[in-house]
Image: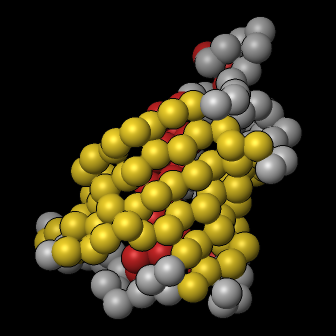
């Protein structure tokens, strides 16, 4: 595995910003093969006051979005380059999504993404989100890079 990426490196690769940037650090990556990324889940997240006030749970759609952002970083560290003023990376599909346990404040969400295929600018990835070694969610996600 290659070296880590800190938040400054991530900000250079992803166009997302607060409150929608859902990757805090890349723990390891091997271009074209695998990425392991981290999302620290804190009570300060803007969605917790409404989801749910008396039992805060990270929305499943945001867990999936974090997976897609990690997949984008994996793509950008490979041969596809990165999103810039002329290109954008879109999340275009999801298959076989399953949620196994809630993600709550204090959790460290570990995102492990491996490519299934990449053809004609469309990539499909196996994505697993885990907390303390337990699978919280898994899915196959599809993303594509397009000109704006």
Quadrant (top left/top right/bottom left/bottom right) for the C terminus: bottom left
- In percent of width and height, residue 7 lies at 66, 71
- In percent of width and height, residue 129 lies at 63, 49
Residue 22 is left or right of residue 105, and the answer is: left
- In percent of width and height, residue 17 lies at 51, 57
Q: Is residue 73 at all visible to an observer of this figure? A: no
Measuring 76% from the left and 43% from the top, which residue is drawn there?
134
Count of labels in the image: 0
Quadrant for residue 29, please give it: bottom right
Quadrant for residue 5, please give it: bottom right
What colouring does the structure picture have?
secondary structure
Taking 31 as reference, is 7 above or below it?
above
Quadrant (top left/top right/bottom left/bottom right) for the N terminus: bottom right
Taking 69 as reference, is 35 above or below it?
below
Pick the residue in front: 132 or 54. 132
Taking 92 as reference, is 14 above or below it?
below
Residue 135 is left or right of residue 82, and the answer is: right
- In percent of width and height, residue 68 lies at 44, 55
Pick the residue in front: 44 or 128. 128
Q: Is residue 29 at all visible to an observer of this figure? A: yes
Pick the residue in front: 99 or 5. 99
Measuring 84% from the left and 47% from the top, which residue is drawn there?
132
Which residue extends farthest top? 54
Quadrant for residue 99, please give it: top right
Measuring 58% from the left and 52% from the top, which residue is drawn there?
128
Measuring 76% from the left and 14% from the top, which residue is drawn there?
55
């Amino acid at each position: 595995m290659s070296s880590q990426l800190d938040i400054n490196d991530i900000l250079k690769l992803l166009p997302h910003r607060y409150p929608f940037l859902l990757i805090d650090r890349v723990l390891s990556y091997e271009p074209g093969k695998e990425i392991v990324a981290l999302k620290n889940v804190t009570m300060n997240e803007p969605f917790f006051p409404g989801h749910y006030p008396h039992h805060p749970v990270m929305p499943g759609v945001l867990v999936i979005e974090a997976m897609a952002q990690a997949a984008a970083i994996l793509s950008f560290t490979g041969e596809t380059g990165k999103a810039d003023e002329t290109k954008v990376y879109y999340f275009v599909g999801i298959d076989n999504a399953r949620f196994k346990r809630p993600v709550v404040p204090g959790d460290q969400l570990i995102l492990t993404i491996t490519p299934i295929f990449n053809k004609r600018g469309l990539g499909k990835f196996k994505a697993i989100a885990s907390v303390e070694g337990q699978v919280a969610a898994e899915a196959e996600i599809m993303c594509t890079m397009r000109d704006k």
